[in-house]
Amino acid sequence: MDTSQNTALLRALTELPGPLPARGVIHVVIRHTDRFTVVGNDLAQHPGLSTTAVGFAVRIQSLPQGTEVGIKALAARFPEGEKLIAAALRELETHGYLQRARTRLPNGRIVTRTVFCNQPAALLRPRAAATPPQLPPAARPITTHAQASEPTVKPEASPEPDPQPEPTPDPPAPLAAPPQAAAPPQAAAPPFVRLVPPPTAPKPPRPPLPRPRELTPELERISTALLSDLRHHAPQFTLSEEHVRELVPGVAAWLERDAHPDTIRHTLTINAPEPVNYPYQFVKHRLTVLLPPPLPGAHDLTPPPARRNPVTPFQTCDGCERAFRAPTPGHCRDCRAEDEQRATAA
């Protein structure tokens, strides 16, 4: 089977016109007549996309409209895993080939709509001005029958002309359609909007290195010793003297917030990449991003007083000496009712 395939390929190679290159790839192009997809070189040779991303872009482009192209759907269709597919889709999103947006259907269900563009650079170019709509043939000015039939040279008069019938008025020429009646031009497609900023977009400024409220000599001494001693615990964290001086305020801010020196050392060196090419930038980043909050005070940890519902005390009725609940001493409800009846009867 392999021998026949190789023989067929070599036979096709001998039929190629012109001299063949001495090295490199040689293309044997057979024209497709059905089941093919056009792929541009801007995608196939994209310098910023990995081979996996280009392959999934071609596969997505070859699928019919409405096909599910989510991570799980592609993993069920192709042999690659979900992590590799997710990374490839993120690359396509970064370079504008793919856009995913969550849309709410009329029934309230939320679905993810995927839009794929085979040439996103064309969407970023300025659009050409819309050409005015062409008038239909019926709306174009036409030549009347009288103008078309008018001869350029008068014929010789006959001695006895036949009686001519009364001329019938020509039908009025249809007027040109008003501009508002013409079919409106199709609305231009909305410009391409990047969901992910391009690699050349300006990055936000980095937060400054934290500083203590007061850099005392004791804090400065401990911070300098801690930074200088990092290379004994991790040789890749060897800092210059100038870098140690610049990082001292950041370590002092940690110490001011009651962070233990061993805790600071562990936070700066744990799970570091191999190798650490820029130890100064790495330590500065962790001192800035992982700064712990100040410890709460004693009053912050005190639980709030429990709210108790007010209880109405018991009172002894001055008339019948029966117990009842009331905020102040006096008569119970029955005694007050009897007093009101006596007052009414009187």
Image: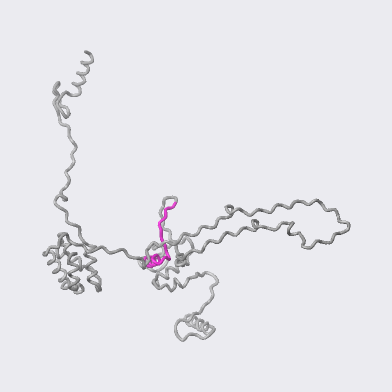
Asked which quadrant contains residue 291, the reply is bottom left
Image quadrant where one finds the C terminus: top left
In-image side of 97 versus 18 (left or right): left
- In the depicted structure, whether residue 227 falls above or below residue 292: below
Q: 281 or 114: which is nearer to us?
A: 281
Residue 106: image location, x then y, percent: 45, 50
Q: Residue furthest right?
A: 159
Residue 107 horizontal side relative to residue 271, left or right: right
Residue occupying image coordinates x 88% and y 56%: 160
Residue 103 in the magenta stretch? The answer is yes
Examine the image and state in which quarter residue 296 appears.
Answer: bottom left
Please identify the quarter of the rendering in which residue 94 is found: bottom left
From the top left corner, tell me how far across and down residue 87 is, in percent: 36, 67
Q: How is the image coloured?
A: one colour
Residue 132 location (% of width, % of height): 56, 60
Q: Residue at x 50, y 81 (%)?
A: 9
**193 is within the stretch colored magenta:** no
Q: Give the left or right position of residue 74, taking residue 312 as reference.
A: right
Residue 159: image x %, image y %?
88, 58
Boundaries of the magenta span? 85-105
Residue furthest top in the image? 346
Question: Viewed as shown, does residue 295 lie left or right of 17?
Answer: left
Q: Is residue 222 above or below residue 165?
A: below
Instruction: Please count the marks in the image.
Output: 0
Pick the residue in front: 238 or 181: 181
